[in-house]
Amino acid sequence: MAGTQARQIGRLQGKVAIITGAANGIGRATALRFAAEGARLMLNDVNAAALDTVLREVTEAGGAVCGIVGDVAKAAEVERLVAEAVASYGCVDILIANAGIIPEADLPAASADLWDRTMAIDARGMFLCCKHAAAAMLKTGGGAMVLLSSVSGFVGQKGQVVYGPAKFAASGLTKHLAVELAAQGIRVNAVAPGTIATAAVARMDPAGIRAGIAKHPMGRIGQPEEVANAILFLASDEASFITGAILPVDGGFLAQ
């Protein structure tokens, strides 16, 4: 056991990682996990106070970290995020495109404005992060991207007529970019979480959460750290021959 742990420590030693949506949930868990593995972090979120808290947590844990408040749906702010990472650390090795929202809406309740806002953050924002991070990675020989999809990016679900299509976009972007960027040394993969114990999920309809958990064969909700572990693997050199994969972290949901 001790030998296994020793080999795992430092799997991202010296790597520069941008993590969007890093202030809470999966983003926060990923930031802490990456810091423990030796990554140098550039964290992003729209919530300045929550981002400050995570920056303090990473610093207190001995991690190298910077942060920038910004909206991934705005091209200029994504450009600034990537530029700040390069200015701070000299390069970008890893992108974790995690920022997103999880609106609940059936078709009658789903407005065009909700559709536009969700697609702006969950789809356009992910595209912009990949576009600008890839440009930086190509200058130093490549890198790895991990995008946040969802089980909702594979199957239809009630009450997700806006969120689900945005995650289908995430899954599609993963595969297309994986093919486009493979020869240039950039791997692009994704994780597809099931129901995870995050603040965003806690704000959802309790009955819907219970129904979602009941569809997970493992019979429980997942933890952000469990998703972070999968993200770590895909971002690390241990996944060096993996690109275009979408790894479910869903308690067996998609196995049915």
Image (cartoon, rainbow, N blue to C red):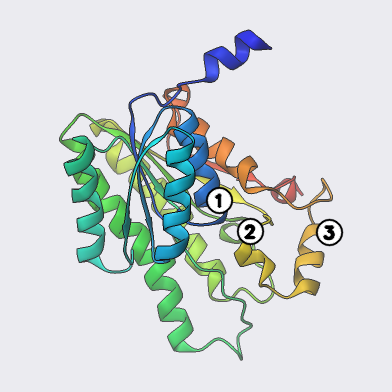
Badge 3 marks a residue whose secondary structure is: helix
Residues at circles 2 and 1 in contact by the CB criterion of under 8 Å: yes
Question: Which quadrant of the figure has residue 88?
Answer: top left
Instruction: Kindly report which numbered mark, 3 or 2, lies closer to the viewer in this rendering.
Output: 2
Q: Residues within 10 Å of mark 3 (few under 14, many from 20)?
A: some
Q: Which residue is mark 3?
A: 214
Q: Amino acid at mark 3?
A: Ala
Which disc number belongs to residue 204?
Answer: none
Residue 107, given in percent of the width and then of the height, sits at 60, 85
Q: Amino acid at mark 1?
A: Ile
Which disc number belongs to residue 26?
Answer: 1
Circle nearer the N terminus (3, 1) = 1
Circle nearer the N terminus (3, 2) = 2
State the residue at coordinates (21%, 49%): 84
Residues at circles 3 and 2 in contact by the CB criterion of under 8 Å: no
Distance (Cα) linking label 3 and label 2: 17 Å
Badge 1 marks a residue whose secondary structure is: helix
Q: Which residue is mark 2?
A: 198
- Residue 123 against residue 94 in the figure, above or below: below
Residue 244 visible in the current orientation: no
Q: Amino acid at mark 2?
A: Thr
Q: Residues within 10 Å of mark 1 (few under 14, many from 20)?
A: many
